[in-house]
Amino acid sequence: MLVGERMTRPVLFVAPDMPVQDALAQMRKERVSRYPVLKKGVLVGIVSEDDLLNASPSEATSLSVWEINYLLSKITVERVMTKEVITVTEDTPLEEAARIMADQRIGGIPVVSGEDVIGMITQTDIFRVFLEMLGGRHPGFRVVAMVKNEPGLLHKLTQAIDEVGGNIIALTTYAGQDIVGGEVTMKVDQIDEQALRKALQPFVHEIKDFREVKVS
């Protein structure tokens, strides 16, 4: 899966000469937490909600509300934005974008094509993919099991579930640090609990979690 398939578009942005108060009001109206900053269509920075909030004076200030509003009206996005912007392209693998966000501790990255900003990939976009990969919106039996690292084992496991009428909604694997085996998480429906447990038994050496999930 690539960034271009899951990025948010059209691009919501602000200009560098916009007052921080206006940018913050727009951000809350559009329910986002960061904006790319564009000047004549060119990316010149990125600004987050924290950047805008930190431009506001402390509640302990002795300034009057009129003085505060006057000072804030003079502070523009350009003064608080980050100018060195990390970007990705639409053909960047989604996991690479997620790694960058985790390593750099940032919540979103502009997606560019040449000099044009064509989208944003954010933590929320990544969370939605994670939710889909684990079948989080579907009812069924959620199983977390430990399996041996054997060629063809997953094929045999899924085939056994299919043969007893189970429908695998989602399946993910996690190798971890154990080279002998790994962890499989799956969501299965159209099957009863006992039939599923029986199908799993020959192929797993430990069931870490088994629960029925009902989604309202």
Image: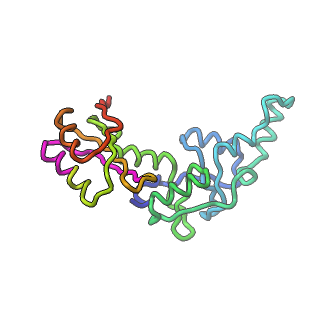
Q: Position of residue 46 (x, y in %)?
A: 64, 55
Q: Quadrant of the N terminus?
A: bottom left
Q: Using the image as rendered, state which of residue 199 and residue 76 is in the foreground.
A: 199
Identify the image quadrant of residue 138: top left
Q: Using the image as rendered, state which of residue 8 and residue 38 is in the foreground.
A: 8
Q: Position of residue 132 (x, y in %)?
A: 36, 46
Most extreme residue toward the right is: 62
Q: Which residues are magenta?
A: 158-175
Q: Position of residue 71 (x, y in %)?
A: 81, 41
Look at the picture and state if 139 lies above or below 205: above
User: What colour scheme governs how the chains and residues are painted in the rendered image of this protein?
Assistant: rainbow
Look at the picture and state if 166 lies above or below 83: above
Q: Residue at x 22, y 50 (%)?
A: 157
Q: Quadrant of the C terminus?
A: top left
Q: Residue at x 75, y 38 (%)?
A: 56
**Does residue 9 show up magenta in the picture?**
no
Identify the image quadrant of residue 49: top right
Q: Using the image as rendered, state which of residue 78 and residue 201 is in the foreground.
A: 201
